[in-house]
Image (cartoon, helix red, strand yellow):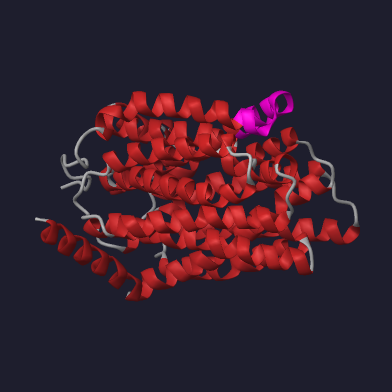
Amino acid sequence: MAKTITATRRGAFAQSVKMLATRQFGTFIIASLLSNMGTWAQQVAEPWLLLSIGASPLLLGLDSFAASAPVFLLTLLGGLMADRGDRRRIITFFQSIQMLCPVAVVGLLLGGSIAPWMVIGLSLVVGITDALSMPSFQSIVPSIVRREQIPAALALSSTQFNLSRILGPALAGVVMASVGAIGCFVLNAVSFIPFIGVAIWILPRRGQRPPARDRFDRRHLFAGARVVARDPSLRSALLTVLVTSLFCGPLVTFAPVLVKQAMHRDVGDFSLAVTAFGLGGLAGAIMLLGIDPGRDRRFFCSLGAVIYAGAMLATALDPWFWSLPPLFVIAGLAMTISNTSANTYLQSHASPALRGQAISLYMLAMRGGISLGSVLTGAIIGFLGVQDSLMIDALAAIALQVAFGGRLIWKRGGAGRSFVAE
């Protein structure tokens, strides 16, 4: 029996890796990796820059809130645009605007007139463009692979994302030590170019457009939400992602505060912690590649969420820096397994006509939870300190995740029905 399971896992892993050799998917993964490396380089530089120019933990949380909050108002519209508009134009237009934001930061740094509110304002622009374009971006993978390949394709996409989470912060550490934060913003701006080019090449032009009278029907805007409301398992997956983002997302958002103010370490140590989180995420994505595509992933979603919260609790109680990277590895691994499993479930069950809106709901749970969690935790840190605030978040996450997914966790490996729609 064990040999059969091992052979199945090896076969699933081999089939997943073969997808990288395909022209469209392989090129898309490489372009996404380069773009995400630039994003993560800036993710390391930006909070450190804010702290360096006098921003408080509350402003740090507000910066994260500004980058994520627009999903509340715009992500469903972005999903509708992905389903009914020209995805090539959507990605090109909004990603080009987003590319100008790090260029603006570079100009402000060179001019010596940078201030926290300017960085937060540009983060808001990034959040708006993300909310409107990310459903189109997320729907690329299901549109260039076969339906039965969606779980493996999403796991591979998660693999490149977490690889960028290793390479980007490592590159940021070198760049910031040599030329300063400005170099990371330059890298991020340049990294948009190959991704935009590949997206234009891969995505077909929109064919027949919907009739004008149907194009902006408000009923379509909430169609995905109604589908989810009728499916308890879809609701459960989104609730798991929401709780993880709301209570555990602050672990990464306030990592610079934890490293700089609580542990009195420098930017190199912060870069090491973020890299460790990415290393764990990469390991989690690779583990998902070995899972049979037909396996029910609800078990992995719930279990990963509880482990993530447990790692966050241990981090909050940890007084030593050198325990931090291993704990971040565990947290990154668990988060990737949980969120990718939920995303796989959602995209596999959504009909092609509503896939963009289904993705927008996933984004709403993930990014919206992070935005709220960041601003609330940032306010609490001002009263209790970063470690006590993270401990409260972790305890709340553990209690809620066990309440939502405890029954699935105790099942033997989630051997229920397939996650992939028949």
Report the side of 390 relative to 350 (left or right).
right
Above or below 106: residue 355: above
Q: Residue furthest left?
A: 1
Q: Nearer the viewer, residue 154 or 122?
A: 154
In the image, the segment drawn in magenta is: 374-389
Can residue 404 be seen from the camera position used here? Answer: yes
Q: Residue at x 89, y 52 (%)?
A: 113
The reply to whether the magenta stretch includes residue 383 is: yes
Q: Nearer the viewer, residue 137 or 61?
A: 61
Q: In terms of secondary structure, what is the magenta stretch mainly?
A: helix
Q: Residue at x 41, y 45 (%)?
A: 334
Above or below 298: residue 384: above
Above or below 43: residue 312: above
Can residue 70 be seen from the camera position used here? Answer: no
The reply to whether the magenta stretch includes residue 181 is: no
Q: Position of residue 229 (x, y in %)?
A: 32, 27
Q: Residue at x 67, y 67 (%)?
A: 187
Question: What number of labels is visible?
Answer: 0
Q: Nearer the viewer, residue 117 or 18?
A: 18
Q: Position of residue 191 (x, y in %)?
A: 61, 67
Q: Position of residue 327 (x, y in %)?
A: 51, 46
